[in-house]
Image (cartoon, rainbow, N blue to C red):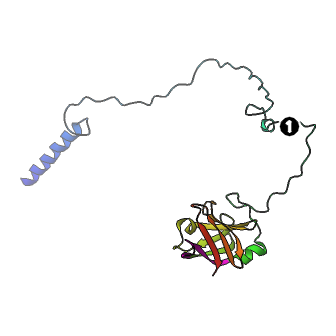
Amino acid sequence: MKCTALVLTSATALLLGGCSTVLDGFGDKASSPVETSQITPAPSGSVESSPVAAPVSATYGASAATAAAAVTPTNQGSATPVALAAPPAATAPGGVAYAEPGAARTQLAGTWNYGWDNGQKSCKVTLSTDRGMSGFAATADVDCPNDIFMTKGWDVWGNEIVLQNHVGKVTARLQPAGAGQYDGVATGDGAKVTLSRS
């Protein structure tokens, strides 16, 4: 008896479920129309074309016909040819020309004491002849001021040592002040700073 009731209940549920036209249950629901993709048909007419007018030739500036003509013109009769220097042998990814280390840079490489606050505070700065993002590589200890801690490069410009941060901005400029001593300024706040051999 129990088996018959179970089979009969299951068959009734199956029949009622199969009769439903809507997936989310029983009953009469208005079916919504299926949305069709609206494809715009290609135009069906004649295509007209006409020749493009020749560009107006300007003598110079933004409206010039060629890049060469865009440069401010010079009087060709009085122009003197100038020999151009060859480009640097190697260039860093940011466009900074690589200089050969040379004797001066090799002698400056090593660990230095960076001093500020009239020599009351100091930290270690290491200059290297390895290539960095801005000239040659440099590192500074964490106890250095923020601008100097971010020093990642250095170079010699004339008789100055320049320290540069990770984007190439000069953070300090120092000039020789004696054997193993350089004095200068931090470019961020203009404070007097020193570099001396460790």
Residue 95 lies, with reference to residue 80, above or below; the image says: below
- Amino acid carrying label 1: it is Thr
Residue 11 lies, with reference to residue 21, above or below; the image says: below
Question: In the displayed structure, does residue 121 sit left or right of residue 175?
Answer: left
Segment tinted magenta in the rendering: 110-122
Q: Main secondary structure of the magenta part?
A: strand
Residue 32 sits in quarter: top left
Residue at 77%, 32% (x, y): give it: 64
Residue at 63%, 77% (x, y): give it: 112
Q: Nearer the viewer, residue 24 or 194?
A: 194
Residue 85 sits in quarter: bottom right
Residue 114 sits in quarter: bottom right
Give SS at disc 1.
Answer: loop
Image coordinates of residue 145 in percent, x first then y, are 53, 68
Q: Nearer the viewer, residue 19 or 95?
A: 95
Q: Residue furthest right?
A: 77
Q: Residues within 10 Å of mark 1 (few under 14, many from 20)?
A: few
Q: Nearer the viewer, residue 137 or 42?
A: 137
Q: Residue 103 magenta-drawn?
A: no
Task: Find disc 1 in the rendering and name its residue.
Answer: 74
Residue at 71%, 60% (x, y): give it: 96
Residue at 91%, 46% (x, y): give it: 81
